[in-house]
Every structure is written in structure tokens, then in C-alpha cells.
Image (cartoon, grey):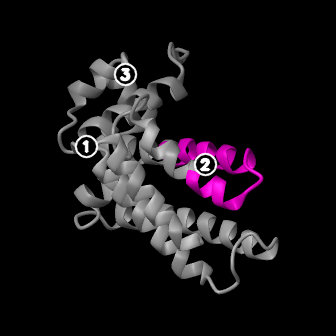
């Protein structure tokens, strides 16, 4: 008779995700994962597979988490400009509550040249974020909030590039004021 799991998969996956987010893939050992997740090594293998499989599950959980947060922000704003600004501010302020930076950016920098599957996954994540910005821009153009002269696809790519840059700079010694000024300048593209 199989034993039932004595842990919540979502909870332990969240712990693994945050550890990978803090330390990166290579620096995170299986023992680190055992210690952080609070479950036996055998349970990790039985539930998630090897370290790489756990990392892929963590990356998927991260995207769902970030997407949910961004969609919530967008729904709470009547203004497209304010929604985009608040997505940037969420990323800026998230380091007060979550590990600094971005797991998908970290994965792209650390692993995308070494692992084609991770490269595809991260690229798809980036494309979805750009798509979110593009959809917002098109909505803003349709409701008259944004100029029809703005190219939605190029502007979305520009905004996403700035969002990635912000996620990197958060990990450095840039001040809150400096990072806020970068956001303000990036958002001028919408004017």
C-alpha cells in the first residue's frame, strides 16, 4: 500500500522556486533543496524527478505566480498607462518581499546558452510578457488613451527590455530613486 504524501506539493515547490530564484540553478545543491523544502531527498525525486526537473517545475510555478500578479495589477487599473506603470512598480517593490531579481531572467543568463529547452521556455515567457504589453497598448489606442502613432509590437518589446533591465538592476546598489527615474523615463514612450 502506497504511503500518502506528508507535505503539500505546492508549498514545497514554492520553497524550491524561491531557492533557485535566490541562488540560481548551479549554486543550488540537492542538499540545499532538501534543507529548504523540508522533505527527504527521496520525496523530491519521487515527486518532482531530478534537480533539473524540479527547476523546470519551479520555472513554471514562477511564471504562473508572476502572470497572476501582473494580471491582478492590470485588472485593478482603468488606465493603460497606470497599469503598465504599476507592473513596473510591482517588479521594483517585489524585492522587499521576494528574492531580488527575476527567476526567468536568471535562468536566461545562467542556462539558456547551455540548455535548449530552458532557452525555449524562457523565450516563451518573455514573449508572453511582451504580448501582455502589446495587448495593453492596443487597448489604450482603441480607447483613445494612447496615440495611434505608437507601434504596439516595438513599444511592447522596448518596455519588456526595460522591465528585464530593472529586474537586473534591482540586484545591484542602484537606489530606489534611481530605479524609479528609469521607470519614469521608460514610460515616456507611451506619451
Which element carries disc 3, helix, strand or loop?
A: helix
Observer-nearest residue: 171 or 113? 171
The stretch drawn in magenta includes residue 84: yes
- Against 35, residue 132 (above or below) is below
Mark with earlier residue (3, 1): 1
The residue that appears at 58% across and 48% down in the rendered structure is 86
Q: How far from the left and from the top, in percent, is residue 76? A: 73, 44
Question: What secondary structure do most residues of the magenta stretch adopt?
Answer: helix
Observer-nearest residue: 52 or 112? 112
The stretch drawn in magenta includes residue 49: no
Q: CA distance from mark 2 to mark 3?
A: 26 Å
Q: CA distance from mark 2 to mark 1?
A: 23 Å
Residue identifier under label 3: 37
Which of pointers 3 and 1 indicates the residue nearer the eye? 1
Mark with earlier residue (2, 3): 3
Occupied quadrant, residue 53: top left
Residue identifier under label 2: 70
State the extent of the magenta-drawn residues as a range: 62-85
The quadrant of the rendering that contains the C terminus is: bottom right
- Mark seen at residue 24: 1
Q: Do we see residue 122 in this rendering?
A: no
- Give the total number of marks visible in the rendering: 3
The answer to whether the residue labelled 3 contacts the one labelled 1, judged by CB atoms less than 8 Å apart, is: no
Q: How far from the left and from the top, in percent, is residue 3? A: 52, 14
Q: Do we see residue 129 in this rendering?
A: yes
Q: CA distance from mark 3 to mark 1?
A: 16 Å
Which element carries disc 2, helix, strand or loop?
A: helix
Mark 1, other Cα within 10 Å: few <14 / some 14–19 / many ≥20: some
Amino acid at each position: 500500500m502506497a504511503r500518502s504524501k506528508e507535505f503539500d506539493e505546492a508549498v514545497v515547490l514554492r520553497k524550491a522556486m524561491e531557492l533557485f530564484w535566490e541562488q540560481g540553478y548551479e549554486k543550488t545543491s540537492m542538499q540545499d533543496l532538501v534543507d529548504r523544502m523540508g522533505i527527504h531527498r527521496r520525496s523530491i525525486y519521487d515527486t518532482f524527478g531530478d534537480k533539473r526537473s524540479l527547476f523546470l517545475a519551479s520555472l513554471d510555478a514562477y511564471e504562473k505566480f508572476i502572470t497572476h500578479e501582473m494580471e491582478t495589477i492590470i485588472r485593478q487599473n482603468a488606465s493603460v498607462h497606470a497599469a503598465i506603470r504599476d507592473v513596473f512598480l510591482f517588479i521594483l517593490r517585489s524585492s522587499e518581499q521576494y528574492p531580488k531579481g527575476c527567476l526567468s531572467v536568471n535562468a536566461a543568463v545562467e542556462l539558456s546558452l547551455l540548455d535548449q529547452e530552458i532557452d525555449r521556455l524562457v523565450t516563451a515567457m518573455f514573449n508572453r510578457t511582451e504580448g501582455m504589453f502589446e495587448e495593453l497598448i492596443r487597448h489604450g489606442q482603441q480607447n483613445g488613451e494612447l496615440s495611434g502613432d505608437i507601434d504596439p509590437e516595438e513599444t511592447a518589446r522596448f518596455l519588456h527590455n526595460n522591465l528585464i533591465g530593472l529586474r537586473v538592476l534591482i540586484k545591484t546598489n542602484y537606489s530606489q530613486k534611481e530605479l524609479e527615474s528609469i521607470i519614469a523615463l521608460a514610460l515616456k514612450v507611451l506619451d
